[in-house]
Image: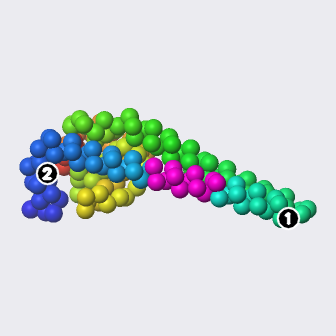
Amino acid sequence: MTAGQAGYCILAAVTETEKIAFKNKLKQAAQQLIEQRIAAAKTLIDNAQEAANSEEKSSVGDKYETARAMGQLETEMHAKQLAQQIRELALLHEVKADIVYHVATMGACIECAAGTFFIAAGLGKQTIAGKLIIYLSPQAPLAKLVQNKKKGESFVFNGKETVIEAIY
């Protein structure tokens, strides 16, 4: 029995209630992470604006204009990041974690030898409850690749054919 098969055997013993509880924990962790990113982006916007305003009071001529433009660019960059995180949070709110899915779709957890994927928000690799989870946005290429696949079907990930061991 391979390590992937051993993980699958353990997963098979997990009840639907436990699967739903785990997905709810994943969703809650994602929400907390996104909310932290939103707060950080707001702080960075405020800091950039404050820096630009303080430069305004103490500078003259070209230096003032350059500092003000740099502050404005930094504020705009952080505002774009803030908007992206707000969109991620809105998308996450649409995820139905209280359903056990049988095909890969938004809100599904996909277990395979390559890892555990949760299609909800594009947060990358996160460790939740001691387990490495790869959070995928529903628009991510990998999420689209596995879309509507079922347990036992395969896909190519990192140049390797990967079999879906479980979906819930």
Question: Is residue 31 found inside the magenta-colored segment of the image?
Answer: no
Task: Please provide the residue range marked out in magenta.
Answer: 35-46
Residue 61 location, x and y as percent? 91, 62
Occupied quadrant, residue 113: bottom left
Q: Nearer the viewer, residue 14 or 160?
A: 14
Occupied quadrant, residue 83: top right
Which residue carries the number 1 mark? 59
Residue 132 location, x and y as percent? 29, 60
Occupied quadrant, residue 99: top left
Say which residue appears at 13% left-offset and 63% top-offset: 2
In which quadrant will I find the C terminus?
top left
Question: Magenta segment, principal secondary structure?
Answer: helix
Q: Nearer the viewer, residue 61 or 164?
A: 61
Q: Is residue 58 left or right of residue 50?
A: right
Residue 27 location, x and y as percent? 33, 45
Local secondary structure at mark 2: helix
What amino acid is at disc 2?
Leu
Which residue carries the number 2 mark? 11
- Compare marks 1 and 2 and give the one earlier in the sequence: 2
What amino acid is at disc 1?
Ser
Residue 161 location, x and y as percent? 28, 54
Label 1 CA crowd tier, 10 Å (few <14, some 14–19, many 20+): few
| Above or below: residue 39 compared with residue 97 | below
Local secondary structure at mark 1: loop
Q: Is residue 17 left or right of residue 69?
A: left
Mark in front: 1 vs 2: 1
Residues marked 1 and 2 touching at CB (< 8 Å): no
| Above or below: residue 158 compared with residue 27 | below
Say which residue appears at 45% left-offset and 42% top-offset: 89
